[in-house]
Structure formats: C-alpha cells, structure tokens
Image (cartoon, rainbow, N blue to C red):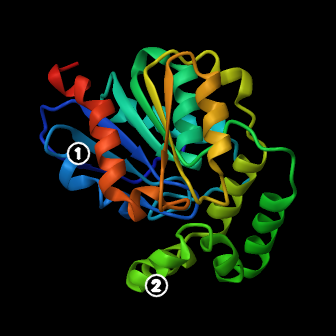
Amino acid sequence: MAVVPLQYRFDGPRTAPVVVLLPTLGTRWSLWEPQLPELTRRLRVLRVNHRGHGSSPAPRGPYSVQELGGDLLALLDRCELERASFVGIGLGAMVSLWAAAAEPSRVTRLALVSTTSWAPPSLRWQSIGERVRHFGTSSVAEEVTRSWFTPGFCERRPDLATRFTEEFEKTDPEGYAGCCDAVATVDHRSLARRVHVPTVVIAGAHDPQTPPGHGRRLANALPDARFETVVGAAHLVNVERADLVNELLLRHLAPVSAHRF
C-alpha cells in the first residue's frame, strides 16, 4: 500500500496534547476554522487534508478508507507523534475510526461527526465519482453541497456557503473521485466493536447525507461512546453550530488536556 504525504498544519501550544482534525469529503482544513480559537487554548491542533484536497497529492484511484488511514498513520510517524485524539467529520470520521481500530495504542479519544459506520449499498457515490472524473467537480457541486447547510443558514451566511462551494470546485477531480470510492465501500459495523477509546458521536439534526439515525447506530456499536444531536444544523454541523460543537468537543477532549503524553 503506497503512502501519500498529506498536507498538514499545526496550531496551538507546542507542549500541549495533540488533537488531529480530519475534514469531510470535498472540504479541506479550513473547515475547522470555527474550532481553532477554542481548541488551541488547551490543545495542539494538527489539521490534515485528504488525498486530492488542498495541496495533498492525488494518485490515481480508487482509494479505500484503509489506504487513507495509512496516509494518516504515516503522517503521525513523520511528525513523531506517539498518541493523539482524533476528530473527524464524514470521511474524516471514517478514517479516524479505522485508525483507532488498526492502532488503538495511538488514539486517546475520538469525536466522530456527521458520519456512519455503513450505509446500504448504493451507486450514488460511484456515480458522483465517475461524473467528476469525466466532467470535473463543478458538474456535481450543487448536488453535493446542498446537504452541507440548512436553507436558513445559507440565507443568513451566503458568504460562507459560497466559499465552501468554491473550495469544493477546486478539489482535484481524481482525488475527490478516489475518496468517493472509499466512502462507497466502507463497512465499519464489525470494526466499531473493537474500538474501546472514549468516543462522542455528533450528528446534525437536519443532515440529509448522514441523518442522526446513522450516528446513533454507530454510537450503540461502540463500547465506550455517547451520542449527541445538534439542532439547527445539517452536514457541516461544526460550521453551522460552532457554539454547540465547540462545547461538546471541549467537554470530551478536556480530560486529555490535563496531562501530557
């Protein structure tokens, strides 16, 4: 399995415990800007871009969650990080869960946001990936991004909705399509039972892409997890309701900040 050197960035105190933030499919590390002011007060934040997102390379796909997780673990090695907490949205949560099962000694805590352990087999993500390979990300931008925010948020903050759409359209087509293949084939139902680190699963109450039922089932499968629903938010719940998500993340990650690894 060839490892891809991912683009990454550190923020926060150098001596603080590390939390890794992984974005969802079609977004990059700027997704986490609403969390930075709060998290960096107590934690060293490592933001990472998946293959083909931002400046991370995009080898020819398809990819698997295992390969994307291998990229992440290799990055931890390169940064000489023995342990960290992981926070991921969508695809980022899938990668985080896989890493926690593959190398449990390296993961302290998990926060899994707007995600699922398994969805019934569907051709949707394969179809989107194929269209992107042939016609580019702009050809699916409206279809993909409409699930990211509630209509009310788009009316209140059209600047943010536009910014995220523009960033999506700049995503490398092959990298995005390869990550679509990873999402389309994920099945973490048995894997979840092997992950024993403290976990919070967060869902947006109005997320049409991964409705709250997906998060609840995932939390029920994890041995040490609790489930939280955030009202007034769709898929990018950390942007739309940053106030509530920041509170949930700090409450979950705060015990880690009391000591160094």
Q: Categorize mark 2 by other alpha carbons within 10 Å: few (<14), some (14-19), many (20+).
A: few
State the image coordinates of residue 51 (x, y, percent, origin top left).
55, 54
Residue carrying label 1:
39
User: Is residue 81 shown left or right of residue 95?
Assistant: left
Q: Is residue 137 visible?
A: no
The kind of residue tagged 1 is Leu
State the image coordinates of residue 231 (x, y, percent, origin top left).
48, 55
Q: In this orientation, which residue lies closer to the viewer: 196 or 1?
A: 196
Helix, strand or loop under label 1? helix
Quadrant of the image occupied by residue 29? bottom left
The kind of residue tagged 2 is Glu
- Quarter the C terminus occupies: top left
Q: In this orientation, which residue lies closer to the viewer: 187 or 78?
A: 187
User: Is residue 10 shown left or right of residue 135?
Assistant: left
- Image mark for residue 83: none
Whether 243 is drawn above or below 189: the answer is below
User: Is residue 105 shown left or right of residue 134?
Assistant: left
Q: Is residue 114 visible?
A: yes
Whether 85 is drawn above or below 180: the answer is above
Q: Residue at x 56, y 78 (%)?
A: 169
- Quarter the N terminus occupies: top right
State the image coordinates of residue 246 (x, y, percent, origin top left).
30, 48
Q: In this orientation, which residue lies closer to the viewer: 149 or 29?
A: 149
Point out the tag, 2 or 1, that comes first from the N-terminus: 1
Residue carrying label 2:
155
Quadrant of the image occupied by residue 84? top left
